[in-house]
Amino acid sequence: MDQEIKCAVIGTGYVGLVTGACLADLGYHVICLDRDEGKLESLRNGKVEIFEAELEPMIVRNMKNGSLSFSADIKSAVSDSFYIFITVDTPSDETGRADITNVEEAARRIAPGVNSYKIIVNKSTVPVGSTNRVMRIIEESEPEYPEFDVVSNPEFLREGTAVFDFMNPTRIVIGSDSEKAIMHMTELYRPINAPLLITDPISAEMIKYASNAFLATKISYINAIANLCEYIGADVREVSLGMGYDGRIGFEFLKPGPGFGGSCFPKDTRALLAIATDYGYNFDLLKGTLEVNRRQRERMVEKLERMLGKLEEVKIAALGLSFKANTSDVRESPAIEIVRMLRDRKANVSAYDPKAMDNARKQLEGIEFADNPYLAARDADALVILTEWDEFKWLDYPRIAELMKRPIILDTRNLLDPQVLRKEGFTYEGVGR
Ligand SMILES: NC(=O)c1ccc[n+]([C@@H]2O[C@H](COP(=O)([O-])OP(=O)(O)OC[C@H]3O[C@@H](n4cnc5c(N)ncnc54)[C@H](O)[C@@H]3O)[C@@H](O)[C@H]2O)c1
């Protein structure tokens, strides 16, 4: 690959870091930028704060061979690069709309560096029309060189398998009205074997929201089915298995649990609902998706209360804090929200997570953090599985039963085998079974 092709990636978070590392690994020369100097300094020292399979060695390897570097100087990185990626965060504002302040700020910082034709590639998840907004901001800043293109290129990676997903995407979406930009984007992604969907910027922006809100709806749907299964006495695992064989439905995203969380599904579903409202369309379906999700966390707490008789002054061992397994990310984690609800109901919570403890400590006060699952379980009145970490499957449950005051398990992820646990003396409940 041509070492001369240079990429600048603005926003060195989950998406930016993975994008930067993978592009470097594909042979491009990449400079990752952030306004957080502390983060850049730890990255320069090879310290990656997020837990993501394969990422750290990939970063270290590419830093060593000179393909990847970190800087805060956006202007000179932009001047030096041909492709400029925007991968900054676009959090929900108080109305549920996506706040694109960071994207706008990045556009303003890019403008002074545009000294030759460049392609600005927006990977952040943004409301429809944002590609044009970025273009206007740069134009209004009157860059040194007048010709540039802004392309929408939404990112679909999943935390936990982000590097694999970047390198093996289900599709690459390129939203642009410029033939020149489309040609260069096709060239950029040539080393990656994936279907290429070339469309206009607004449709590209919509594809991202429509996909995430659909997956969120699928989760709320199976959660609602699971809840109904509990009323009628069916086993949701059998039901979802039987549904999944239908190719039109598929097996994925049919696992009930405490509801969806993370940095994308809740935020993007709220944002799409807000877009619909702003354009005068009443998207009631998404209101239902969000409402089922909100209630699902409460249902888990109510279930535990039923199992225990009360929550006040009981000790609960909470296993799992990240929003799903294989990530240290706790943003909008259902586990964190459930632990907070338990704490607010005056339960004494002792929590453990294999990777998310540091992040959780920043968000949770008034609970105890245990160094391992057995310490969390000691003298507990109940144990609740909140994240589907594989290691929780293989714990020594007979030992846990001995350590606990009362052997009660609420498995919000249907991770464990009820029959085995009941044989070991546990009172066990899962979701929808
Ligand atoms: N996390 C995911 O799994 C995922 C997947 C697909 C798409 N997305 C989308 O990608 C975008 C980024 O998400 P993320 O999870 O990587 O966010 P993040 O919070 O992990 O990282 C964002 C980074 O951008 C930096 N930043 C913000 N504004 C900046 C500015 N003006 N100049 C320089 N740096 C700036 C922040 O300091 C931070 O390091 C969001 O729009 C998100 O919705 C995320």
Image (tube, rainbow, N blue to C red):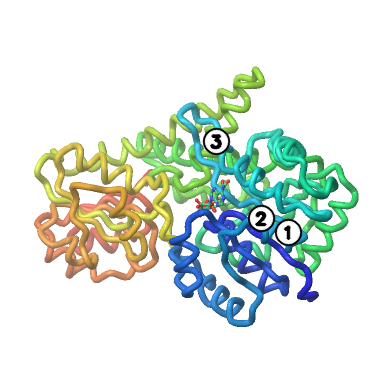
Other residues around mark 1 within 10 Å, as few (<14) / some (14–19) / many (≥20): some
| Proximity of marks 3 and 2: CB atoms separated by less than 8 Å | no
Q: Residue at x 45, y 71 (%)?
A: 47
**Residue 195 quadrant:** bottom right
Q: From mark 3 to mark 1, how far is it between C-alphas?
A: 27 Å
The label number, if any, that marks residue 75 in the structure image: 2
Q: Is residue 203 left or right of residue 297?
A: right
Residue nearest the observer in this picture, 168 or 128: 128
| Residue at the image position 21 percent from the left and 58 percent from the top | 369
The answer to whether the beta carbon of the residue marked 2 is less than 8 Å from any atom of ligand 1 is: no
Q: Where's the N terminus, which quadrant?
A: bottom right
| Rendering coords of residue 389 (x, y %) | 38, 62
Q: Earlier in the sequence, mark 3 or mark 1?
A: 1
Label of residue 216 in the image: none
Q: Above or below — where is 45 with respect to 276?
A: below
Label 3 sits on what residue type? Asp
Ligand 1 within 8 A of label 3's CB?
no
- Whether residue 206 is visible here, answered yes or no, is no
Identify the image quadrant of residue 191.
bottom right
> Residue 40: x percent and y percent?
50, 64
Q: Is residue 340 left or right of residue 169?
A: left
Label located before the other in sequence (3 or 2) = 2
Measured as percent of width and height from the top left, residue 378 is found at 13, 62
The residue sitting at 74% across, 66% down in the picture is: 6
At numbered mark 1, what does the secondary structure look like: helix, strand or loop? helix
Above-or-below relation of 280 to 94: above
- Residue 79 badge: 1
Q: Is mark 1 within 8 Å of ligand 1?
A: no
